[in-house]
């Protein structure tokens, strides 16, 4: 497991985008917790309440659901990504997906209550929150578009064109095949 240092990477990411007041910095610093998980660990389970969002500082994760005894991968992300069950977190209801570490992972974690307190108290965090939601929707649209591309080769090509090479190279092929809705042998043939 990668050791944590004193840097709060979520704060660094925010400060690279917006100017934060000292009060906002202190608020976030006082509320962040850290979690480390081993490769293979499921840290959000379908059907359970998800009351935290996670800022991934090291590692690779995927979300999936089970259908007809198969795991269907819905997304994969790497460092400096926000990770949560979007439906479960924002509606404070059971998660629709299971989220699993594909590598050893480190996270900075924030509760639902702390996020909403920060958004309410600090206009600059409210702005960053809105920008984050925009990014999520853009990525969601890319995934939705990709899922509707009719041929396996075209879906694969679209994914390659819209994914960082470093991330692409780290994704286990069986999960990439699942994400692209193709069989592993098809992925081998078209890649």
Image (tube, rainbow, N blue to C red):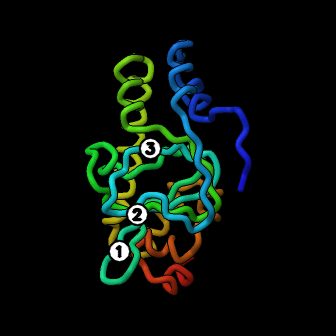
Tell whether 191 sits left or right of 159. right
Tell whether 54 sits left or right of 113. right
- The outermost residue toward the top is 22
**Residue sitting nearer the eye, 178 or 84:** 84
Report the residue marked by disc 1: 66
Measured in 3D between alpha carbons, the distance from the residue under mark 1 to the one under mark 2, in whole angstroms, is 9 Å
Tag 1 near tag 2, CB within 8 Å: yes
- Could you tell me residue 94's position as x and y percent? 28, 56
Find numbered disc 1 in the image and state the secondary structure of the residue it sits on. Answer: strand
Report the residue marked by disc 2: 98
Quadrant of the rendered structure where residue 183 is?
bottom left
Q: Residues within 10 Å of mark 2 (few under 14, many from 20)?
A: many
Measured in 3D between alpha carbons, the distance from the residue under mark 3 to the one under mark 1, in whole angstroms, is 22 Å
Find numbered disc 2 in the image and state the secondary structure of the residue it sits on. Answer: strand
Q: Is residue 154 something one can see in this rendering?
A: no
| Residue at image location 71% in from the left, 33% down from the top | 6
Q: Is residue 187 above or below residue 3?
A: below
Tell whether 103 sits left or right of 135. right
- Could you tell me residue 154's position as x and y percent? 43, 69
The tag earlier along the polypeptide, 2 or 3, is 3
**Residue sitting nearer the eye, 95 or 184:** 95
| Residue at image location 42% in from the left, 40% down from the top | 135
- Could you tell me residue 62's position as x and y percent? 49, 62
Q: Residues within 10 Å of mark 3 (few under 14, many from 20)?
A: many
* Quarter that holds the C terminus: bottom right
Report the residue marked by disc 3: 53
């Amino acid at each position: 497991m990668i050791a944590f240092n004193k840097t709060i990477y979520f704060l660094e990411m925010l400060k690279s985008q917006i100017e934060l007041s000292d009060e906002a910095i202190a608020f976030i610093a006082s509320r962040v917790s850290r979690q480390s998980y081993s490769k293979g660990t499921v840290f959000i389970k379908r059907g359970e309440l998800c009351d935290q969002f996670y800022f991934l500082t090291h590692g690779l994760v995927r979300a999936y659901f089970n259908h007809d005894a198969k795991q269907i991968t819905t997304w994969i992300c790497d460092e400096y990504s926000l990770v949560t069950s979007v439906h479960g977190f924002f509606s404070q209801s059971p998660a629709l997906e299971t989220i699993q570490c594909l590598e050893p992972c480190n996270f900075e974690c924030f509760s639902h209550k702390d996020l909403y307190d920060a958004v309410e108290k600090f206009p600059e965090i409210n702005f960053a929150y809105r920008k984050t939601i925009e990014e999520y929707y853009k990525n969601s649209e890319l995934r939705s578009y990709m899922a509707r591309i009719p041929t396996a080769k075209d879906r694969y090509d679209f994914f390659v064109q819209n994914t960082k090479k470093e991330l692409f190279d780290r994704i286990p092929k069986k999960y990439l095949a699942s994400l692209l809705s193709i069989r592993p042998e098809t992925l081998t043939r078209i890649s």
